[in-house]
Image (cartoon, rainbow, N blue to C red):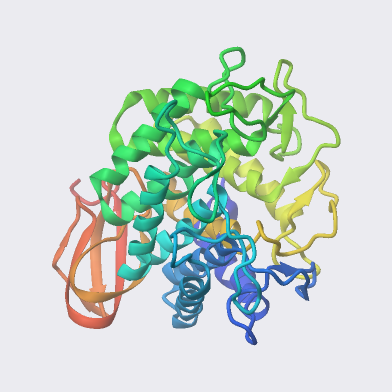
Amino acid sequence: MGGKIMEGAFWRDQGLKDLIPHWYEHARDVEYGGFHTNLSRDWRPLPPWDRVPSAISRHVFGFCAAYLLSGEDRYLQVAREGVDYLLKYGWDEKHGGWFNSFSRTGEPLDTSKSIPVQLYTNAGLALYYFTTGDERALSYIKRSIEIQKTYGHDEEFGGYYQALKEDLSVKDDGKNKHAHYGYVSSLLLNLWLATRDQDVLDWACHLTDLTLEHMMDPETGWVLGYVNRLDRRWRGTPGPTVHVGAQLTAALSFLRLYHQTGDARYSEQGIRLAEKLNLYGWDRERGGWYELIERRKPHRPVQPVRIIWWNQIYGSFLQLQLYRITGDEACLERFERSEEFWERYFRDREHGGVLPEVSPDGEVVGDGGKASAWRTSYHEMEHALLNYLYLNLYVAGKPAVLHFNFEGPGKRFVSLTDDPSVKVSEVKVDGRRWDRFDPDERSVELPEGKGLKVEVRLESKFYLPNA
């Protein structure tokens, strides 16, 4: 086992050299602002031209990831422009909440507020806040969360609704992934790392506990709520299939929350679900992570079998998280084989970037389009960023360096890894050594100044000298 796939620098370089340059060149709408919603396989903008706030914010995430890895100003500038555009057109100033969509010129189109759009719009803003400390982003996230906690809360049966109308009355009272364990995985875990706000962590635990109480299939042990749904009373007949990506999201959420809380219930549930996924959700012969499998044993892949780009990424993330907790070398073997599949089949050698889906044998499925309302630079740059961090810090015992751009003075939290054994070992501010940091808290106390370029070196205490 070894080679470039097991090196964090390989994934950092893939993101910075092979992926984000294409998005930088083609994704931005220089005429109207924001980003093109749809791009062909060869990166041509395509209709429809409507904008979705969550897609814009996911691009903000992708360009922030590029800045964290590189410190290149052009990437942060694109992220900042995306945030400005999003705040100008995406937020309902009268009632609150993110519109489901608006026109290319900024007029609201679908004025309802579905939880997936609310969630993923906040997700990109959370990484922007982590990277810059821009309080504007945090204020909108907090307002959105407060809407979900109040208007989106089911006072009678508990849990949170699927969608609200423009005036924040209930539009869809069903219960699903995005309002519960998906909300934790895609937003709250990173938001806590950026803020260390106890209320954020408490709500992550609350949503996870609701998931474990109401959304576990007692017959099979899979997590419900996507692609099937539960009604307001948490009732629903599980369908015949299981979405592997949703299960990967849940398992990662449980394992990461364990690191943040130390609660063994979450690690036990995460490991249990991960073991099922490794057995049934993964093609051991070829290395791909399935999209759908049968809910009941023998859990065969559903025909026609498809391998989806984000499932493949999250399957790899799961192996690194499992390895950190269990130390089982088999996790690294699965990781390597998963990423070999990625390198062989998902990388678009003809047009650059990443393909959205392939067959188990690597044949392109569909038109290979690069962007849509739910496909942006987000997942592939998250892949580059987290593989760099996890391989260096969790596997190889090497340091990892992240770049920030902060306003001072004040304290900022600077680790994107959940495991508290990762520490800050060195900080530079505008190129000079800076000693006012807390290694264990993983925070930096900033001096006065605007646009401070902060470089942070992270290491695992298991590899720090004299640890």
Q: Quadrant of the N terminus?
A: top right
Image coordinates for residue 433, horizontal then vertical, percent: 20, 75
Residue 38 appears left or right of 222: right
Please give the name of the residue rendered at 42% of the width and 23% of the height, measured from the top-left corner: 268
Q: Is residue 210 above or below residue 89?
A: above
- What number of labels is visible? 0
Single out the residue that lies furthest toward the bottom: 31
Q: Is residue 221 above or below residue 110?
A: above
Please give the name of the residue rendered at 68% of the width and 50% of the height, measured from the top-left corner: 309
Residue 423 appears left or right of 35: left
Residue 421 in sight in this render: no
Front one among 176 and 403: 176
Which quadrant of the view contains residue 109?
bottom right
Residue 453 in sight in this render: yes
Please give the name of the residue rendered at 63% of the width and 60% of the height, measured from the top-left corner: 110
Image coordinates for residue 46, horizontal then vertical, percent: 78, 72
Front one among 353 and 165: 165
Image coordinates for residue 25, horizontal then vertical, percent: 65, 80
Q: Is residue 400 above or below residue 323?
A: below
Image coordinates for residue 218, horizontal then vertical, percent: 56, 14
